[in-house]
Amino acid sequence: MTGKLDLDPVIVNQARELARLAGQPVTELARTHTTVSVERAVLRLAGLDGADSDGMPWVNRLTDAIRESVGLEHGVALPAWDAMLAGGYPDLGTLAVDAAAGLVKFRLPAGDDGDAARQAAGRSVKRGISLIDARRAERDRMIAATSSPPMPWIYLIVATGDIYEDIPQAQAAAREGADVIAVIRSTGQSLLDYVPEGATREGYAGTYATQENFRLMRAALDDVSRELGRYIRLTNYASGLCMPEIAALAGLERLDMMLNDCMYGIIFRDINPVRTFIDQRFSRQVHARAGIVINTGEDNYLTTADAVDAAHTVVVSQLLNEYFGREAGLAMGQLGLGHAFEINPEVPDSFLLELAHAQLIRELFPDAPLKYMPPTKHMTGNVFAGYLLDAFFNLAGLMTDQSILLIGMMTEGIHTPFLSDRDLALENVRYVRRAAGQLGASFRPEPDGFVARRARQVLAEAVDLLAAIGSQGLLTAIAEGTFGVTKRPADGGRGLDGVVRRAQAYFNPAAEMLEPAGGSGGLSGSSPRASAAGATR
Amino acid sequence: MSLTGIVRPYGDTTGDGRVQLSFTLPVPFGDETERARAEGAALQLAAKMGLDPAMVVHAKGMGPDFTFFIVYGRVSHVVDLSTVTVAEREFAVLPAAEVNLRIRSVLGRKLVVVGACIGTDAHTVGIDAILNVKGHAGEKGLEYYREIRVVNMGSQVGVVDLVARAEAEHADAVLVSQVVTQRDAHLSNTREMAEAFRRELGPERPLLVAGGPRFDPASARDLGVDKIFGRGTTPREVASYLVHALASAGNTA
């Protein structure tokens, strides 16, 4: 696509290079450490599921037992599979039961025993990775048998707390025109250091992310996809303390998109920065393999800061998310970078400013399936004004060729959407698409007009901020409150006790299979890259 | 508030009583018979709500089972202004900017809040909803307020540690959350905490605030704390209370 903003390619390259410099030390941290959740994800990929009578998953029980006995510096795989072989256990489940009861003596095997344990672990984990590959191929087949809707995809949320209520609502939303269904999680799940089990019917302002809930919703959306001849994508959240495990479950159950931001948990949930970056890298490697499109959370910055003053922090975060994502093996077509229409409507020229920001991001990331979020902060309860603002959001999204439109509700901030709110919202976007869907092709901002100048100004501010981060380091910048309004020191927040430095002989068969060949942004030769959740623009 | 008298809704003429409303009924809007029945159902509801006459100006089927209506009508009810009662709050709920402004003018420094789940309670959902930037019910948590410094100690915090931390941080207020109520643990934990602060810090103790879904908001005095918040409390209410309490206490808190 040819640029409409006349961005200087030298400055664009400089921005990317600065993002890489800021991110690289953090990547190094992720390569040299592991976390309890990364290790539990390895066990999940090897097929360990279920929970004890208290609802605590067996992956937690086994990981904790191994940690108490021999530590996690070498990973769970080596001691776990050694104990399986030595004790003649038929599977991880029976080993976990005995380990939780304190009946298993773990060790770090050497020599032939070590080799045998590594091979057995590799075979088990490989089955999980192969299942993820099979799920990806299954998605391609489903899309071939139905169709992939044209972009922008219409993204709608359900959030009843009860998976069996969510299902008919999601199917109804798909029939009304939704291309993507997101199931909002229960409040506070991000702070649980375990993934709940089974189908759940009680959640607060959302539904728990569990493997069974994933499976049930995906099956229901497959039914409605076949009915409509249009593949309906399913979204959930790989964030919080169990990010790697939820990514694995998403891959195993063929979710299509996952919220997965590099800094959201740190800033908004006070999760330890080091824990977050380690978990993030592993989870993105899984997403890369599974063909899942990630959605990043830059829209959140604009809910706490002024959307004009903080516009450049969105760009900085996107560049960091791009670096971390590419480094972990995600293709550009899997980077659903986020942003939002959150400028105060009282500000003069607010729509022009929104166009400038949205067009800037479109041109910085021409191959990314950008996710554009509707107004929330300035939805006042005047539902009539809110409906108008949502129409302007839809118009900005179409004019600037955004890829995924989260549909705004005129009752935002009042209640979870009524059936009629959703229907009116879809009527709104259908009208704007019908009336102005082609406007983007004719939209040419004056080269030195307001929109183009504003876009260049935001880019310049982003470069300045990245340069400032570069000289002090990303962790220091986060500690000093550069993103959002809060300071998040590297030794603070939740989950730091789950971070372990890897020993020289650390062994993680999943990480080895998922590591991108050739480093930064490289392609892992073994997995099919071409059709990341069908996200082609 | 000296307004008295009888008023009706105003459309375009005094006393015309005209209102609008929209709602959904779980009735189909398919063929002509169904449509007629759906509109009749909407008019029946409007009549029962006091709209007479009423007019369905818009009806639209949503899927096979639902119909959305917009109705205008003349409402037969009147409002007697002399009987309108206004609930008095002990403090006004303020916007974040106003909270920040008042902290600056009253304290001249940041307000320090130490929060924790005490006892064996590991349910941090409540305290996190109040403290985390993420917040709750569309409102940002206390961390979002520029003039509030938040120390969130997390769950299963011992009372001794809480007192020590509150003293070390020069806390203006301590927020504790209690969800577990087995054997009234929330009450005994809160009393124990209040006594410890009184014993260790005496009159220099910070403002003590407890919250949780099963507390009786009227039990603050009995439990030895300054304020109890119940279910559904939002961060803005807590922030507004804190500035109100600290301002009215002068600097004795």
Image (tube, coloured by chain):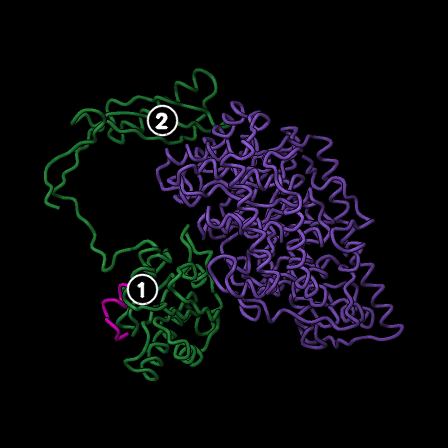
Chain colours: A purple, B green
Q: Which mark is residue B70?
A: 2
Q: Which residues are magenta?
A: B243-253
Residue at image coords 47%, 64%: B124
- The answer to whether B203 appears left or right of A189 in the picture is left
Circle 2 marks a residue in which chain?
B
Residue B89: in magenta span: no
| SS at mark 2 in the image | strand
Mark 2 crowdedness (10 Å alpha carbons): few <14, some 14-19, many ≥20:
some
What kind of residue is marked 2?
Ile
Q: Residue furthest front?
A: A448
Residue at image coords 37%, 71%: B174
Q: Quadrant of the C terminus of chain A?
A: top right
**Residue A350 placed where, x, y %?**
43, 38
Is residue A95 visible in the rendered image? The answer is yes
Foreground of the two, B200 or A194: B200
Circle 1 marks a residue in which chain?
B
**Residue A500 placed where, x, y %?**
67, 71
